[in-house]
Amino acid sequence: MNAWHAAAGGAVAAAWSLPAVAPLSPAVAAGLRLRRTAASGGGVALTFDDGPHPEGTPRLLELLRDRQVIASFFMVGEQVARAPALVAEVAAAGHEVALHGQRHRNQLRLAPREVARDLDRGAACLADVTGVLPRVYRPPYGIFSPAGLVLVRRRGLAPLLWSKWGRDWAARATAPGIAAKVTEGLGPGDVLLLHDADYYSASGSWRKTVAALPRVLEEIGRLGLRPLTASEAVWGRSAPQPSAESTASGGGPAGSSRETSQSM
Ligand SMILES: [Zn+2]
C-alpha cells in the first residue's frame, strides 16, 4: 500500500464511500464490522502486503525462520504468477497466504464486476499455487468500495485491515522509523502492516522493511506476544484449517457467518 491519502483523497469526501475511510477510522471500521485487530488477545498478527517479491520475500522469510515467528503474506495475484515457487515456499514455511487482489487496484476505481473478477482471479491464482483458497482478504490501500465489501463477504473472504502500520512504503521511511512506528504502543491484539515488495511503493522500500524487522520481532518477543496468523486474528484460536473444499464453491458464504459474528 502506498500514498493512502492520494489514493483515497477523493473518496474521503464522498459519503457513499464510507467503507473507504475504515483504515483511518476505528469507529467506521467497527460500524462496518471490518476487523482491524485480532479476535482474541494475547497475540499479534504480523502481515506483509504486495508480494511476493524475489528479493524482499526471501529475506523476510529468513528473519522469520530464525526467530521462529509465523506471519501472513497478503499477496497480489499478478505477482504470484511471476513467482509461484516463492509462494509455495512461504506456505511450506507455515505462514499464511492471504489475498490482496489480482491486481493492485483501488476498489473505488473499479466497477463492481471488475472487483468481482479481480477477487475471483486472485483467489484462483493463489489456489493454483498453494492448493487452498485464501480465506482472508485485504484490499489494496485498505480501501473497500461499498460494492466491493459486499462482494468480498459473499465469497466467504474475511476482511482484515490493521491497527498499526510502519509506513514502510514511503520514500522517506527509515528502518529505525519503521520499527518505531509499527511497534508504538504495541499490545495484545494488534495487527501490524508491513510490505515485502516495492511494486506499488517507493523503489527498494522492502530493504528498509527487512532492516526494520529484527527490531520489530525483538519488541514482539520482549512483550511476550504470541504471533498469530491472519486467520487466527479473524477467528481466534479456533481458526479453521486450510481446506480446498471449504470455500471452493466460490460464491458460497463459507466463513462469512463466523466473520460477521465477531466484534471489532
Ligand atoms: Zn498493497
Image (cartoon, rainbow, N blue to C red):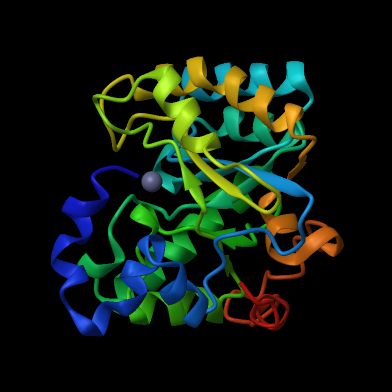
Q: Residue visible at 16% across and 61% down? A: 9
Q: Residue visible at 66% across and 27% down? A: 219
Q: Quadrant of residue 226?
A: top right
What x and y, as percent, mark residue 248? 68, 69
From the viewer's perspective, tell me whether residue 93 is left or right of residue 80: right
Q: Is residue 242 above or below residue 176?
A: below
What x and y, as percent, mark residue 261? 70, 82
Which residue extends farthest right?
Answer: 238
From this viewpoint, is residue 112 visible? yes
Tell me the quarter of the image containing the N terminus.
Answer: top left
From the viewer's perspective, tell me whether residue 164 is left or right of residue 240: left
Which residue extends farthest front?
Answer: 185
From the viewer's perspective, tell me whether residue 40 is left or right of residue 119: right
Q: Nearer the viewer, residue 236 or 31?
A: 31
Q: Quadrant of residue 225?
A: top right
Q: Nearer the viewer, residue 261 or 225?
A: 225
Report the number of discs. Answer: 0
Q: Is residue 84 above or below residue 242?
A: above
Q: Residue visible at 56% across and 22% down? A: 213
From the viewer's perspective, tell me whether residue 150 is left or right of residue 215: left
Q: Residue visible at 46% across and 24% down? A: 209
What x and y, as percent, mark residue 53? 46, 27
What x and y, as percent, mark residue 180? 48, 28
Q: Is residue 12 above or below residue 209?
A: below
Q: Nearer the viewer, residue 53 or 36?
A: 36
Tell me the quarter of the image containing the C terminus.
Answer: bottom right
From this viewpoint, is residue 54 visible? no
Q: Quadrant of residue 217?
A: top right
